[in-house]
Image (cartoon, grey):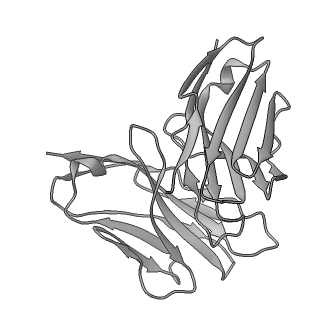
Amino acid sequence: DTEVTQTPKHLVMGMTNKKSLKCEQHMGHRAMYWYKQKAKKPPELMFVYSYEKLSINESVPSRFSPECPNSSLLNLHLHALQPEDSALYLCASSQDPSSFYEQYFGPGTRLTVT
Amino acid sequence: AQTVTQSQPEMSVQEAETVTLSCTYDTSESDYYLFWYKQPPSRQMILVIRQEAYKQQNATENRFSVNFQKAAKSFSLKISDSQLGDAAMYFCAYRSGNAGNNRKLIWGLGTSLAVNP
């Protein structure tokens, strides 16, 4: 099973709301990633968790807060977002963070900030 | 810094025909990995094929194959017997194999492929 699941599929939130995106994988992968993707653009890396510890933060604004409660689950907490944060948010996982292992992507959450 | 260039923003192919998508990259490293990802309008990013730089043999996955020219830093994707389901955005990506580097994927801007019936 090479499945990464993400919930919700769509999310509309106001600039004062707090919401969370959820990502789950049951492949025993030890690296998990959050990406942001604008329409017709490649994904932009936001965060990398390696063995449940945050290893890379690509200078993401603090209104995005990642969390890795366990090796199968990755959350992205959202607070006080801006309209320009509207995008497709993709989660991915790989067996470990080394380059040898490819990343498997989830279907994404389409976020609209109003 | 490494860069990936996809020079064809859009391409089209007739069903059952063959199409080649181009990708070039720039790096001074010798250890790296190259990937082609497909993202259909349904949006899920799917790995199509991967190539390790140390392997001379071109990777093949069913109807998908690559032409990996290491000296020319070229990594093109050939799709044979194109099907309607191949219509998607195709991204070429590079990842450093050097453990000391930030090993994030470096992406090209993508090629949007249309398949005409």
Q: Residue at x 51, y 65 (%)?
A: B35
Q: How many numbered discs, if any?
A: 0
Can residue B73 be seen here? The reply is no
Q: Residue at x 59, y 73 (%)?
A: B33
A64 up-or-down from B97: above or below: above
Residue B83 placed where, x, y %? 21, 53
User: Which of B12/A81 is in front?
Assistant: A81
B86 up-or-down from A16: above or below: below
Can residue A84 be seen here? The reply is yes
Q: Residue at x 77, y 48 (%)?
A: A70
Residue B32 placed where, x, y %? 63, 75
B67 up-or-down from A111: above or below: below
User: Which of B72/B17 is in front?
Assistant: B17
Q: In the picture, which quadrant includes the C terminus of chain A?
A: top right
The image quadrant of residue A68 is: top right
Q: Is residue B58 left or right of residue B51?
A: left
User: Which of B24/A70 is in front?
Assistant: A70
Q: Residue at x 49, y 38 (%)?
A: A40
Q: Is residue B6 left or right of residue A28?
A: left
Residue A25 placed where, x, y %? 61, 49
Residue B107 placed where, x, y %? 58, 55
Q: Is residue A39 left or right of residue A35?
A: left
User: Which of A70/B90 is in front?
Assistant: A70
